[in-house]
Amino acid sequence: MNPPMSLSGAETGLIKATGGTWKKEITWTLDCDGSRKATSGAVPNGDTDGTSVTLPLGDSCTVKLYDSYGDGWNGNTWRGFGQTCAMPTGRTATCNFTAGQ
């Protein structure tokens, strides 16, 4: 994965959700400072192209992972902005980070 890129007070990164099985069960959202920045529907092909997102530096961000079956992300991980978020079990998980840190 390419490292995030900084552009005068902003950071652009490529978000991917890959690495495991049962991708059709998984979705995710990315909210920063109360605003929806990106979302993914079911990821049947592993989201191999990824989603490019630009965030203002210093934004407080929350990634929410969802699994429709309730057995976790089956080895898949969310990666973006130097962060990795996983959900070994369950229906939902949350990860937090600050853009640019």
Image (tube, grey):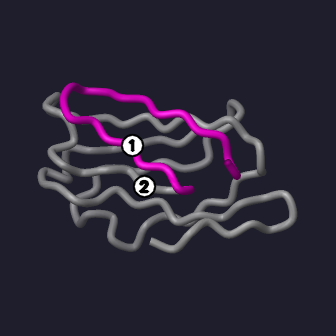
As drawn, the label of residue 85 is: 1
Q: Quadrant of residue 88?
A: top left
Nearer to the camera, 51 or 76: 76
**At 78% across and 59% down in the image, what residue appears?**
10
Measured Cα–Cα span from mark 2 to mark 1 = 7 Å
Contact, mark 2 vs mark 1 (Cβ under 8 Å): yes
**The image quarter in which residue 72 lies:** top left
- Looking at the image, residue 47 sits to the left or right of residue 58; the answer is left
Residue 19: image location, x then y, percent = 23, 59
Three-letter amino acid code at the position of disc 2 = Arg
Q: Is residue 93 above or below residue 59?
A: above
SS label for mark 2: strand
N-terminal of the pair, mark 2 or mark 1, is: 2
Q: Quadrant of the N terminus?
A: bottom left
Within the magenta stretch, is there residue 6? no
Residue at 50% x, 56% y is 80
Badge 2: residue crowd in 10 Å (few <14, some 14–19, many ≥20): some
- Helix, strand, or loop for circle 1? strand
Residue 79: which numbered mark, if any?
2
Question: Could you say which is closer to the camera, residue 35 or residue 2?
Answer: 2
The amino acid type found where label 1 is placed reads Cys
- Magenta stretch: give its range: 81-101
Left or right of residue 6: residue 83: left
Q: In the rendered view, would you say 34 is above or below 19?
A: above
